[in-house]
Amino acid sequence: MCPPGFWRFWRRRYSVNEVDVLLSSMSEAAVLKARQLFQWILSFPESYIDDRVIARLDNFGGLGLFVDCNAEPVKSGTNLLSIPISCMMECPPDTPAGSQHAALAKELIKQRGLGTASKWWTYIECLPSPDSLMGMPLFQHFHEMHSSLGGNFDDNYQSIVFQNLSASPSTKEPFSLLIQRTLTEFKGLCLQNDITVGCDHGIKQSIQSQHGIMDYVWARCIVSSRAIQLWSGPTLVPGVDFLNHDRQPNVVCSCISTNTETTSKHRSIYSPPSSSEEGDWEVDELAPTSESTPKESAVNDGIEPSREEKRPERFFVCESIHDINQEKEILWTYNAHSLDIGWLLGYGFVPGDDSSSQGDLFMRTDENLSSYQPCIASYVRNVVKEGNVLDSVSET
């Protein structure tokens, strides 16, 4: 689904006819890239995508996953996607908890800088371009301020940014802390020289370049809105990105560790965050299952397997919980427990605040978004209004 503000941004830059032509060509290219991504995912051992699953445009002009119109309906309990850990992009091991999202953003920039030499290049090509992120407050605010400052990132950049924020009280409260953190993260990366930004610029050289900071903001937005908290921290899971949200989903996504020697399995149900600024996903641990005599696996208990025990295979799977007919979209709820303002904050559009109560968080967010993006503010109101109904949505 296209992010809020996408249409307004493109209409502002082009005429109506030009936009129609652009969107038509962009849509065809996006579908083609999605098909190529499917082929890439299937090149990994143990990966699986049901033949009936296709990627095409939804009613909002964004990509989604659907059941092929020429295929048999999908029955409840069908495994539709199985993505092995070898296909995922993880943050580096042993990264401190408070730095994991920044580390994953750094890894994403590094892989994008490698171009076609990157293992994940096919996936990276499917990620939203900077233009399509204009609906995300963090990206749009950085873009506007960065452009007004001529793209110069120096010692005065941060102070000038906050001067601009002070001149716009309606935007200062929800975004200033997130902008400050993003700038701090970027300045920390500038002290290193082991990643590339864009195609061929070292991070140190990018300090004075026009795109250095925006490359990092782009990666940070991608991680903020797409990463799932798995075994080693926030993780980008190719293919799952195409699953759109619905309050009444027809699939559930799970995290499975399988001990190939004993066929025992540990499954965790994952759903997006309810209130965490960093986007940590909620986890429901389920009891292990086994096709034979189970041998307890310690993967989800945080205990390293013994040297004699073979390392378990790990997958992120998508399973239908209802029958899905032909041409129907495959939908996942971005918060399976309850759909409230927290999922919107954690999803990456605006920063959350662990120290605030949910009521205070709603009031502050609603007040500031009303003048910035009415569509989001209206949606937040509806989410809170319908909270009692949404809490009754069951998990299967």
Image: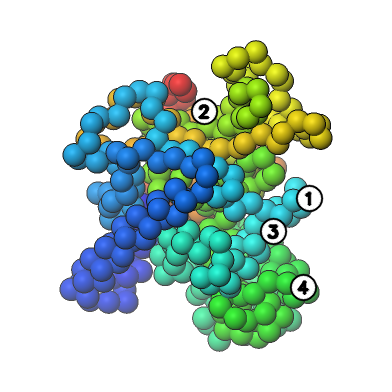
Foreground tag (3 vs 2): 3
Q: CA distance from mark 1 to mark 2?
A: 30 Å
Q: CA distance from mark 3 to mark 2?
A: 28 Å
Question: Alpha-carbon neighbours of circle 1 within 10 Å: few (<14), some, or many (≥20)?
Answer: few
Image-based side of 90 in relation to 321, left or right = right
State the residue at coordinates (66%, 64%).
Answer: 106
Q: Which residue is mark 4?
A: 192
Which of pointers 4 and 1 lies earlier in the amino acid sequence? Answer: 1
Query: x, y percentage for residue 339?
Result: 47, 33
Q: Is residue 220 left or right of residue 253?
A: right
The spot of residue 92 in percent (x, y) is 71, 55
Question: Does label 3 or label 1 sit earlier along the sequence?
Answer: 1
Question: Disc 3 designates what residue?
Answer: 103
Q: Secondary structure at mark 2?
A: loop
- Numbered circle sitting on residue 86: none
Residue denoted by label 1: 94
Residue contact at pointers 4 and 3, CB within 8 angstroms: no
Vertical order, 222 against 341 (above or below): below
- Determine whether, in the image, residue 108 is placed left or right of residue 300: left
| Residue drawn at the location 59% of the way across and 62% of the way down | 108
Q: CA distance from mark 3 to mark 1?
A: 11 Å
Q: Residue at x 71, y 65 (%)?
A: 185
**Number of the front mark, 3 or 1:** 1
User: Tag 1: residue type?
Assistant: Asp
First in residue order: circle 1 vs circle 2: 1
SS of the residue at dot 1?
Answer: loop
Q: What's under tag 3, amino acid-wise?
A: Ala
Q: Which mark is residue 337?
A: 2
- Number of residues whose C-alpha sits closer than 10 Å to that of mark 3, classed few (under 14), some (14–19) or many (20 or more): many
